[in-house]
Amino acid sequence: MPRPRKRRKVCNLPENSLFGPLNAHRPTGEKIIMTIDEFETIRLIDLEAMTQEECAERMNVARTTVQRSYNEARRKIAAFLVRGNMLKIEGGDYKLCDGSEQLHGCGRCFRHRAGQKLI
């Protein structure tokens, strides 16, 4: 029996979840679905400039899981850009951080910044 999947910790949901070409009347091809945890991996590694090890610690998963998720997310972004497909960010196996992370060093958690609504 396979091991149950470990839910990835996510502290930032995307503000926009649907992307597509602006110069096409109708996008061709199928819609590409990127999961919330893949989005979080891209955000942490590429935008926040974390290493895979730091990202894995933040998301509470193994580094190999982050590496797999990161590679899959980049493949989807490349297909979106090159083929002109629509990209939708949704789903995945994740849990939102609950605020206790600030006690454990997650001071950059977007959910807990002053003046920002909780999602």
Image: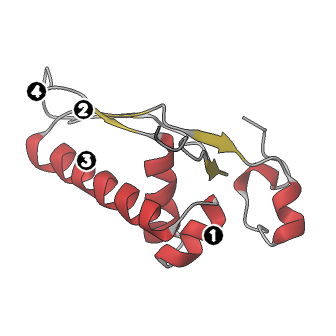
Instruction: Name the amino acid type tagged 1.
Output: Glu
Q: Nearer the viewer, mark 1 or mark 4?
A: 1
Q: Secondary structure at mark 2?
A: loop
Q: Secondary structure at mark 1?
A: helix
Disc 4 target residue: 29
Instruction: Name the amino acid type tagged 3.
Output: Lys
Instruction: Name the amino acid type tagged 4.
Output: Gly
Specify whether 12 is left or right of 79: right
Disc 1 target residue: 57
Q: Earlier in the sequence, mark 1 or mark 4?
A: 4
Quadrant, the C terminus: top right
Above or below 31: residue 93? below
Q: Secondary structure at mark 4?
A: loop
Q: Earlier in the sequence, mark 1 or mark 2?
A: 1
- Tag 4 near tag 3, CB within 8 Å: no
- Marks 4 and 3 sit apart, C-alpha to C-alpha, by 13 Å
Disc 2 target residue: 86
- Marks 3 and 1 sit apart, C-alpha to C-alpha, by 24 Å
Residue 29 location (% of width, % of height):
10, 27
Instruction: Name the amino acid type tagged 2.
Output: Met
Q: Residue at x 47, y 37 (%)?
A: 1
Q: Earlier in the sequence, mark 3 or mark 2?
A: 3
* Count of marks overlaid on the render: 4
